[in-house]
Image (cartoon, rainbow, N blue to C red):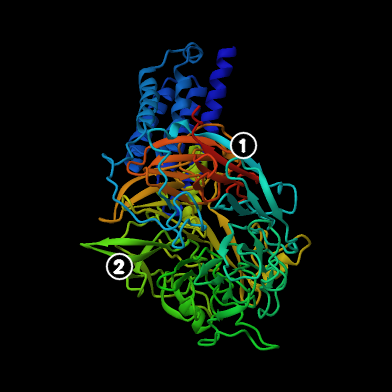
Amino acid sequence: MRLAIGRRVLALLLLLIGLVVAIGGGQLALLGGSLYYLIGGIAVAVAGILTWRADRRGPLLYAAFLIVTLLWALWEAGLDGWALAPRLVAPAVLGLFFVVPWFRTAMPKRPALAPVAAGAVSLLVILVVALLPADYGAKAERPTVPVTVAGAAGEWPTWGRTQGGDRFSPLAQITPANVADLKPAWTYHAGTTGSWQKSSFQATPLMIGDSLYLCAPTNILIALDPETGKERWHFDPRADKTGNSQVTACRGVAYYRANNAADCPERIISATFDARLVAVDARTGRPCASFGNNGFVDLKAGLGEVLPGFYYVSSTPTIVRGKIVIGGWVADDQSTDEPSGVIRAYDATTGKFAWAWDIGRPGVTSEPKAGEHYARSTPNSWAPMSGDEQLGLVYVPTGNPTPDHWGGARSAASERFGSSLVALDASTGQPRWAFQTTHHDLWDYDVASQPTLFDMPVGSQSIPAVAQATKRGEIFVFDRRTGRPLLPIVERPAPQRGSVEPDRLSKTQPYSVGMPSFAGARLTERDMWGITPLDQLWCRIEFRKLRYDGPMTPPGTDRSLTYPSIGGGQNWGSVSVDPSRKVMIVNSMYYPAVFELVTRAETDRILDKPGGYSHNFALPQRQAGAPYGVRLTGLISPLDVPCNKPPYGTLSAIDLSTRKLLWSRPFGMARDTGPLGITSNLPLPMGMPNFGGSVTTVSGLTFIGATQDTTFRAFNTSTGKLLWQSRLPAGGQANPMTYVSPRSGRQFVLIVAGGHMLSRSPLGDSVVAFALPEKR
């Protein structure tokens, strides 16, 4: 009797699953999708009915279903293990119940079990084979060549180590041969969790002389002993926390030696969430009385109305030829009337205003007169900038004008300079050249990555170059003196479905064809993923419902798919360059987003409800002044996992001589995430979403945190082989750095473990330094 009950439970399970899959499969077929789910669902349901009746044809039918499933899965996914998993694992596991002893004895007539066993085992074998690790690496080490390194070799004097942000260190104590011996040397806690910290701790410290300098997300400035991590001083500018913004990052500070200053000959310069520029003495942390107004400059001056939380400086100030150049973060998606994206410069010694690049006032570089203000809602620059002291240029990555997803009211100047790379004269603020990476940007593809300066090998020449990574996954490369493209860029036709009046769409968009693209292949129904066939089927149906015409599918009043998403591609972590090997390291993210323009009346009705505020991404973003708000969501299954197949993050290396990929590999494991938000604790190498960048060393190492799985890693720069990893107290969503302690002469590698809300990594306040064991 009990055996019969077990058989009937299996039969009911097959019938239920079969009916659900058949119904969903029918819906998918009506949408023009695969017929497999409809046919397979019917087959499984019938197998369930036959099994209930103890008919030997039930197991045989299920065996046939497994064979068809195997062939279909191989046809759709090849030997891609992650793509095969949702297609094969659950059906194979269910099929194994047919071969357990209790089932065989529960059947009045013993069924032919061989086909079922063969089908189930073959599916599992194929899966195991497909999941074997691939060889991601190049076949041989790349030789190094001598390089000239700016600054003291053991220091890290600017956010990207150099003004040009190459994130390359000439230090070689830690090598591929001994990196496995790295151990935590010290940990410092900034004490910000539990306070008004709302955003990730993303700082990259500077190392100058005998001190580390950094800022907390609460804008507190900190100096540490580089040998022990002991705090030397901290200064709290008491930033006003008012505002709904979910982004309050302080990614780093700047250092300036003011030889002729009345005080503070060495100073640390930063900016605050409430829009003030601050300079403090690098030795004591006290505000520099000779800078601005007792150490502070009001950055709201000339901006007009600034609602709390709508404007601040998130990235490190850039200093070129004695000028502090800053942009500013402006709230996304809120209004057609927001603070200006003006770029301003201040004297690094006195704090006096030097110039402004306000695209709404072409040719006018002075501050606005009393009662006037900089042009409103123009493209801003929240990302880290770069500078070239010799050329006297500042390289400014710009965002798109507000609001982000409707452009019907944008000015001609905003259309020209939005989502661009602009080279400004550091002395005058006048633009020297510009290139637009996205025309009429309606996707929030603002240029988030720091421009990277390096010498580009072109034939027998070495040309001063600047590479601009983008959220689109395109990397554009220019002669940094003139803006002339060093590698081909082509204009390709852009999708036109989805246009809304009185807005328009750009007919074409630029693509870099001289560098590998990290945009990911155009998504198809086959790319939809899930933990099981059920949620994969759900994702296929959702995909078929969306309007998707490939890259640059514009938002509209229906639901449309954007890939890469507003996170990238590449984000603020940018790329790193090893000039000794002529290699560029690129970390990328692959995660689609769903857009929907919501009518003005409906947006206002929703947001006027109690609790409806405009920074809640479950609700439409207001875009006040536009005919539409906008709803932004991820393409997520009911089990709360991405609908596109892994990997969601990769780490890659480009040979800068040939512009070909040396290697590319998924990086990041799924251990700290899982379905329904439940931590899986499984070290599955899926490749995870990542925020943050890398650092390379002359010894041949690439260090990077960035991923969702709270792990810091070291790779062989030449081959991509993982050499070392260490768990962190929270996600390492910050750019790492490395230095030599002047006290011991030891090389340290450091990363801030601050977590990231969008990566679902709990916020943290740790600064963690690693070093090789001391020799005794």
Query: In the rendered view of the protein, which quadrant contains the N terminus?
Result: top right
Residue 49 seen in render: yes
- Side of 352 where 435 appears, left or right: left
Rendered view: 107 above or below 726: above
- Side of 412 where 281 appears, left or right: right
| Residue 481 image-quadrant placement | bottom left
Residue type highlighted by circle 1: Ile
**What residue is shown with label 1?**
678
Rendered view: 599 above or below 576: below
Q: Dot 2, crowdedness within 10 Å: few (<14), some or many (≥20)?
A: some
Q: Position of residue 555 (x, y in %)?
A: 51, 67
| Residue 162 image-quadrant placement | bottom left
**What residue is shown with label 2?**
486
Give the secondary structure at mark 2.
Answer: loop
Q: Position of residue 526 (x, y in %)?
A: 40, 47
Say whether disc 2 or disc 1 marks the residue closer to the N-terminus. 2
Q: Position of residue 715 (x, y in %)?
A: 41, 40
